[in-house]
Image (spheres, rainbow, N blue to C red):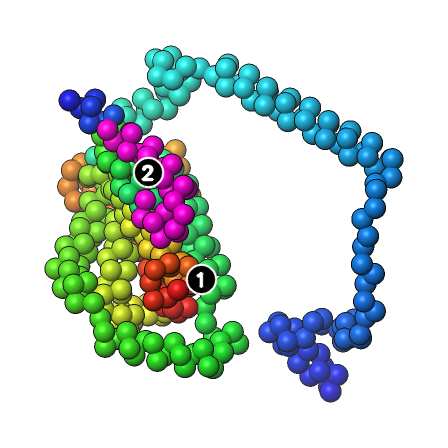
Amino acid sequence: MNVIYELILIVFLFVCAIGAFLSERLLIAVVIFMSYSLVMSVIWALLQSPDLAITEAAVGAGVSGILFFITLKRIHALKGTKDE
Amino acid sequence: MNKETNFFKRLNDWVNGEADRLFPELQETDTPKAPEPVATIGPLPNKDVLFLTSYQAVALIVVIGMVSILLYTVYKLPLFGVADNPAVNEVVERYVEKGLEETGAVNVVAGMILDYRAFDTLGESSVLLLAITSVMMLLLKDEKNTDPDEELIEAHEAVIEDHNRDMILQTMTIILMPAIMLYGIYVILNGHLSPGGGFSGGAILGAGLILFASGFGHNRVKKFFNMNTFRALTTTALLGYGILKTYSFLLGANHLPTGIPLGIPGAIFSSGLIFVLDICVGLIVACTMYGFFSVFSRGEI
């Protein structure tokens, strides 16, 4: 059961990694990148390194995504919003 | 005297980027230049064709050589997960067996990164401070790099934004913020007992501050966290880390007695310096995370 769960997570990780650079809209690429980090943090927890899992969830899925959003807003690259 | 003031004025202008050079006689004057002749592309001379072909051939040979050397090295590397690999050597055993006894930390990872390898962590914290300093050098707003019109538009937008705050975000912030802050403080203070520690806890605290700032605006955060707080916290934490670790390095490198009691393993006030160092790292990381957000989004803290 655990193996199936890990396999599902790893497949999702690959899908996120490929989807992040194949997506044409930068906003969606950042969201996919954040979900990649979230899946990665679950995998760290399964690999018995909770230290890394906490840091990955806070930095990868939280802070770095927000910094990307602010950068996109500053360069007026948020498509489909009033900032465009 | 007159010349001296001139010199200092010129130095000042040069530092502020208003004059090109320190010495005016070297300064470029704006003489109109003759338009450069447009380059025409004709057929390449025979010598150049030969050079380009040989250049590409040499580049190809170098790349193939490098790739084969790297692949050969990978082929010679020990297999993954074999018991007698060099990675599975005495250092790991030493950390696992003697870690609790020597550092007093139940969480062996905290014992490793804040005791055996504490200078690594000092370097990482300094890198964070260096990064936020460079970001502030590039993006911090002052009267030199802002346009008054732009400033007016931004102030106008800020007022509109203050009156149209997102209600869902505000309600969720009120519910989540205390839990996030408490969890961050718990992770920092419990770093030597449970997974986590300074870096993770600091990142959680910083994320909580960012959530509050995006829900209620920067001005609300400014009431308890402004530029002076930021400067005082980061420099005090980094200096404290450096001084404490230098003390223990001068007196107790190689685990000679330092006079700092290790306490009972498992108690909250235990494991000597690791407790204090965790707090220092947590403060630096939290300030840096919020600083990145604030400087990126508004150009000030």
x, y percentage for residue B16?
60, 74
Front one among B242 and B140: B140
Tag count in the figure? 2
Residue B248 drawn above or below residue B11: above
Residue visible at 75% across and 83% down in the picture: B3
- Residue A24, label in figure: none
Vertical placement of residue A64 versus B106, above or below: below
Asked if residue B204 is positioned above or below residue B83 in the image, the reply reads: below
Residue to which mark 1 is pinned: A75
User: Residue A49, can we see it?
Assistant: no
To the question of a shared chain for discs 2 and 1, the answer is yes
Dominant SS in magenta: helix
Eyeballing the image, is B83 above or below A9?
A: above
> What residue range appears in magenta?
A8-32
Are discs 2 and 1 less than 8 Å apart at CB? no
Q: Is residue A8 left or right of residue B113?
A: left
Q: Nearer the viewer, residue A65 or B76?
A: A65
Task: Quickly name the residue at label 2.
Answer: A16
Q: Position of residue B26 (x, y in %)?
A: 79, 71
Q: Amino acid at mark 2?
A: Cys
